[in-house]
Amino acid sequence: MCDCSCASQLKDFGTIERFVEPCILLLLSQNPSHGYGLVEDLEKRCGEKVDIGNLYRTLRRMEKNGWVTSDWDTNDAGPDRRTYAVSSEGLHYLKEAVASLNRTDTLLHHLFEGYKNAHQKDTTL
Amino acid sequence: MCDCSCASQLKDFGTIERFVEPCILLLLSQNPSHGYGLVEDLEKRCGEKVDIGNLYRTLRRMEKNGWVTSDWDTNDAGPDRRTYAVSSEGLHYLKEAVASLNRTDTLLHHLFEGYKNAHQKDTTL
DNA sequence: CTTTACTATATGCTGTTTACATATACCTAT
DNA sequence: ATAGGTATATGTAAACAGCATATAGTAAAG
């Protein structure tokens, strides 16, 4: 199943590919953070579990893509943290992703309309 | 990339996993059809290309899941067609999928709000 | 009559991503 | 010491995607 679990309470339905990525970029654009810290933020914002192992891989992939940069933070107590921040490319990707998700949203509503017309015509729901 | 191309004009952004499946179920619930015929309908409804090879595989998977049934149609001119129809399990899945996609939609709008507040506060867009 | 194009279904292959498990290591409290 | 929380990372198998290719019936053109 999809790790972009933000998108759905149920498995198998309606998860959006790579939905975590814009979510992460938005969170990081508000304040830089590290993988372990993002889990809680993502869950708070999306009400869903995110697999921590895949989150780390996602962050590395996003860095490889140039959307985020990382630096080791050795100052604080506890283990070192790899702190991520958004790049200008990342902001650009975020903008495009939001635009694309808006189109996705239109198609979604298209389906909702079709379903409503075909299967909910005479119910009060 | 995702074959559920219904969900997006751009690749890499906002495609919804398994979005074709509810689309197919809705179309089939309106009138039974076959793989090759569904391509056009899906493109008409969603404005996107669907890989025909993957569509056939998707239909077989859906049949294996019990969501659709198929019969060979040898009557018409041209090559034989495997005609698909929705089962009651399929209608049940469609209902759940629509409900799940509604939750997905809520999360999408959550992201849109967050983005708007963080990055579009002082634009006229 | 044969070649081209359209209709129709299906499989092969490879890369990406996912879910789940596991490894490593620092730090704090008991 | 040892248990538990913080933190990053990799191993692995399965699923699914995109793209190419195989097969075959039909129909029109030349």
Image (cartoon, coloured by chain):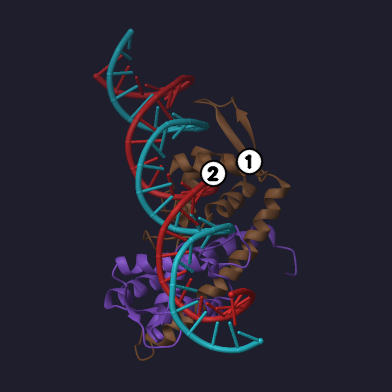
Chain colours: A purple, B brown, C cyan, D red
Q: Note whether B101 is above or below B123 in the view shown.
A: above
Residue B91 spot, x, y in % from top left: 69, 52
Q: Residues within 10 Å of mark 1 (few under 14, many from 20)?
A: some
Which subunit holds the residue at mark 1?
B
Quarter that holds the N terminus of chain A: bottom right
Q: Residue at x 61, y 39 (%)?
A: B84
Marks 2 and 1: in contact by CB < 8 Å?
Answer: no
Q: Residue at x 60, y 29 (%)?
A: B73
Q: Of residues B54 and C20, which is closer to you in this image? A: C20
Question: Is residue A102 shown to the viewer in this render?
Answer: no
Looking at the rendered structure, the kind of residue marked 1 is Glu
Total labels: the figure holds: 2
- Residue B58 image label: 2
Looking at the rendered structure, the kind of residue marked 2 is Thr
What residue is shown with label 1? B63
Q: Residues within 10 Å of mark 2 (few under 14, many from 20)?
A: some
Q: Note whether A43 is above or below B23 in the view shown.
A: below
- Residue A101 image label: none
Q: Secondary structure at mark 1?
A: helix
Q: Of residues B24 and A20, which is closer to you in this image? A: A20
Residue A28 spot, x, y in % from top left: 40, 81
